[in-house]
Image (tube, rainbow, N blue to C red):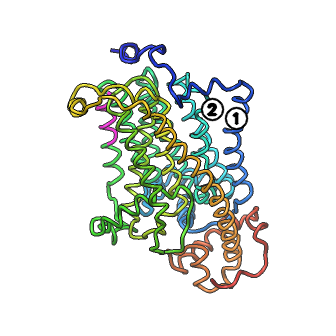
């Protein structure tokens, strides 16, 4: 039976779904000029602010994990497709495709970090545009104004660490691969060509960093809720297993291995880390290894998770080929899995680790998915289907949630969005300024590396590696005229004065 027939049989006609308080269709009652102005500003403002952040605070310098890119560039200097160099494990990550992009940037821009960060911005904007298009394809009656919160969250400046660190281009590549895979799998009529494209996107994401593997379970959730063919489910599962086996072949536990059982031995600390990680989409930062936890950030994380799980379970009790709710559930699943994986691998860093800006890019998928689920209000008031879940639900006095369910959930999610914007935007801008100052200092240290002590080199250029490693990598970068040593903007912005004082 085709998806179109299923949609006709399972979805009531539009007349059966009258608008209720808070329904997105009520947005259309606004005067057209006002609605168009709000929509244009709602999409243009976050995109403009994000691009301004890149233009204002980018620095062409090599810091932290990005020094490992110098090794990849050196090893591929004579043979572009040096598989061992491109496949080499970095911490827990297989970064084959990001490494390939790095090598291409080295050959075309002398590894200009500014170009890498603009590429990251392009990947993010493309991913957000693709997601919005996919939502409108599934729910054309949803007004564009109702989708503004998605753009506001996805383009939040609270993710400034990823925005202003070229190494995180890998994460934005995964973000785009996730959206490509889900949008292709979410087509009303899933062809084998579209399915193959989704598999290819998931493969690229899988071999870009560890969290790329999470595309597979998110896609599986979407396939299940869209009632796809058993062959699609079986092939997706098979491809997921193959990708995981290839990823883990000759895999070595690295940075997190001494603490791999921390969550098992400290479950309450791990739970606190998890909720702080989700709740810190507002951008609160603490000092390194600070164990003091902000109860408000943890509480905000509890609220976000509670809302997301409640809405996902209610909309997910019924497999539905129509509407946008299944796409929202898939994003919630991805965001929660990402937070769980980070908690397992980084909880031993305590609250400081949970407040890292770079995690917010994927943590924000949880409220984004919740917003998408609420764009299908009828999913919250329909009875549960047959089966074990339906029988459990039927034993309760009401098989449908009360009429106030959707407005209450929508108001709570709107509060989350408002808090994230009101607190996360200024915190993100402040963090971006501090990050810019730090990178300018790092550039001056790098340009005068032969004059600075080891502790300064480690502090500014790579806190988790030795000074001898940093000096050797800097010598390679200078010899190959990479980044700041190519005489590009990083050198000019940092100046040629004496290096800063020791930390």
Disc sitting over residue 259 in the figure: none
Q: Which residue sits at x=40%, y=48%?
A: 306
Graded by Cα atoms within 10 Å as few (under 14), some (14 to 19) or many (20 or more), the crowding at tag 1 reads: some
326 part of magenta stretch = no
In the rendered image, residue 266, in percent from the top left (x then y), is placed at 30, 69
Q: Mark 1 sits on what residue?
A: 38
238 part of magenta stretch = yes
- Quadrant location of residue 334? top left
Lateral position of residue 100 relative to residue 336, left or right? right
Graded by Cα atoms within 10 Å as few (under 14), some (14 to 19) or many (20 or more), the crowding at tag 2 reads: some
In the rendered image, residue 182, in percent from the top left (x then y), is placed at 45, 35
| Whether residue 387 can be seen here | yes
Lateral position of residue 419 relative to residue 304, left or right? right
Q: Which residue sits at x=49%, y=35%?
A: 407
Lateral position of residue 452 relative to residue 323, left or right? right
**Dot 2: element:** helix
Q: Which residue sits at x=62%, y=83%?
A: 503
Magenta highlight: main SS: helix
- Quadrant location of residue 148? top right
Depth order, front residue of 181/51: 51
Q: How far apart are marks 2 and 1 (CA)?
A: 7 Å
In the rendered image, residue 398, in percent from the top left (x then y), is placed at 29, 30
Q: Mark 2 sits on what residue?
A: 145
In the rendered image, residue 57, in percent from the top left (x then y), is placed at 71, 60
| Whether residue 207 can be seen here | no
Magenta residues span 232-240
Q: Is residue 20 placed above or below 479 in the rendered structure?
A: above
């Amino acid at each position: 039976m085709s998806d179109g027939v299923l949609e006709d049989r399972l979805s009531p006609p539009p007349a059966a779904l009258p608008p209720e308080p808070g329904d997105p269709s009520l947005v259309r009652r606004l005067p057209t000029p006002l609605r168009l102005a709000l929509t244009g500003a709602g999409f243009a403002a976050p995109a403009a602010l994000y691009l301004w952040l890149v233009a204002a605070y980018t620095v062409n310098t090599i810091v932290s994990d990005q020094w490992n890119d110098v090794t990849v560039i050196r090893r591929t200097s004579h043979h572009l497709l040096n598989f061992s160099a491109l496949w080499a494990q970095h911490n827990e990550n297989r970064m084959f495709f990001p490494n390939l992009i790095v090598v291409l940037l080295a050959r075309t821009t002398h590894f200009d970090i500014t170009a890498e960060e603009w590429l990251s911005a392009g990947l993010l904007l493309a991913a957000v545009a693709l997601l919005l298009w996919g939502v409108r394809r599934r729910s054309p009656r949803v007004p564009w104004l109702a989708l503004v919160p998605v753009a506001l969250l996805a383009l939040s400046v609270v993710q400034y660490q990823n925005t202003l660190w070229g190494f995180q281009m890998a994460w934005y590549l995964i973000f785009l691969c996730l959206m490509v895979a889900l949008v292709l799998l979410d087509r009303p009529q899933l062809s084998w060509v579209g399915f193959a494209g989704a598999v290819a996107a998931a493969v690229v994401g899988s071999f870009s960093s560890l969290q790329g593997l999470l595309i597979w379970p998110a896609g599986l959730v979407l396939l299940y809720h869209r009632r796809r063919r058993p062959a699609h489910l079986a092939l997706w599962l098979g491809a997921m297993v193959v990708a995981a086996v290839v990823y883990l072949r000759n895999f070595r536990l690295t940075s997190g291995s001494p603490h791999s059982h921390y969550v098992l031995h400290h479950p309450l600390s791990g739970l606190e880390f998890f909720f702080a990680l989700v709740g810190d989409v507002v951008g609160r930062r603490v000092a390194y290894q600070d164990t003091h936890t902000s109860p408000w950030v943890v509480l905000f994380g509890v609220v976000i998770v509670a809302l997301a799980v409640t809405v996902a379970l209610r909309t997910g009790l019924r497999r539905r080929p129509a509407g946008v709710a299944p796409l929202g559930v898939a994003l919630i699943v991805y965001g929660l899995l990402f937070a769980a994986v980070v908690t397992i691998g980084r909880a031993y860093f305590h609250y400081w680790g949970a407040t890292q800006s770079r995690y917010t890019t994927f943590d924000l998928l949880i409220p984004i998915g919740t917003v998408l689920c609420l764009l299908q209000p009828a999913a919250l008031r329909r009875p549960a289907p047959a089966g074990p879940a339906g029988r459990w639900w039927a034993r309760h006095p009401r098989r449908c949630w009360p009429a106030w369910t959707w407005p209450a959930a929508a108001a709570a999610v709107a509060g989350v969005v408002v808090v994230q914007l009101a607190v996360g935007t200024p915190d993100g801008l402040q963090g971006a300024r501090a990050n810019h100052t730090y990178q300018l200092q790092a550039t001056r240290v790098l340009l005068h590396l032969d004059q600075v002590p080891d502790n300064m080199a480690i502090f500014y250029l790579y806190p988790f590696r030795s000074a001898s490693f940093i000096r050797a990598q800097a010598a390679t970068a200078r010899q190959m005229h990479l980044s700041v040593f190519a005489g590009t903007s990083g050198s000019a912005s940092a100046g040629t004065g004496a290096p800063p004082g020791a930390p």
